[in-house]
Amino acid sequence: MRAGRRHARSGIRVATFNILFGGTRREQLITDVVTRIDADVVCMQEVCNLDFARSLAERLGMQAMFEAAHVEFPASG
């Protein structure tokens, strides 16, 4: 069970969260939401501040991992 988990449960809970525009000036709101959903895995999109993401993961007893977006555009013609 992850540190701080309120209740034991079977299975895992996965959440996705688009924090929009990097989450600038909304760090506390994002922290509150991620804490409240109590997921085992949280996938956040549009993260610009990696230090914030690392800090959030640490506070929640989680591990932060990052991957850059890969965009492919169809060939025009």
Image (cartoon, rainbow, N blue to C red):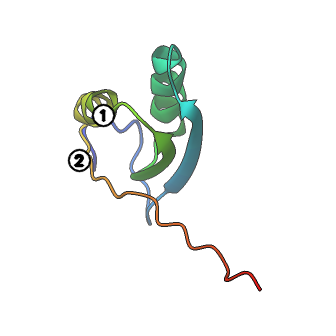
Picture residue at 27% right of the left edge, 53% below the top: 65
Q: Is residue 3 above or below residue 23?
A: below
Q: Compared with residue 42, is residue 6 higher up or lower down, i.e. above or below?
A: above
Q: Which residue is drawn at 54% across and 19% down?
A: 29
Q: What element carries label 2?
A: loop
Horizontal side of residue 55 vs 68, given as left or right: left
- The amino acid on which the numbered mark 2 sits, given as a three-letter code, is Gln
Quadrant that contains the C terminus: bottom right
Residue 43 vs residue 50, the one in the foreground: 50
Numbered label tally: 2
What number is the disc on residue 63?
2
> Is disc 2 surrounded by few (<14), some (14 to 19) or many (20+) residues within 10 Å?
some
Of the two numbered discs 1 and 2 in the rendering, the one whose residue sits closer to the viewer: 2
Q: How far apart are marks 1 and 2 (CA)?
A: 9 Å
Q: Circle 1: is it few (<14), some (14-19), or many (20+) Cα within 10 Å?
A: some
Which quadrant of the structure image shows residue 67? bottom left
Q: In this view, does 15 lie to the left or right of 60?
A: right
Q: Residue 28 carries which label?
A: none
- Residue type at numbered disc 1: Leu
Q: Are marks 1 and 2 in contact (CB under 8 Å)?
A: no
Query: Could you say where residue 52 lies in the image, as x and y percent from the top left?
Result: 32, 27
Seen from this angle, which residue lies furthest front?
Answer: 77
The residue identified by callout 1 is: 60
Position in image of residue 74 (x %, y %): 67, 80
- Dot 1 falls on a residue whose secondary structure is loop
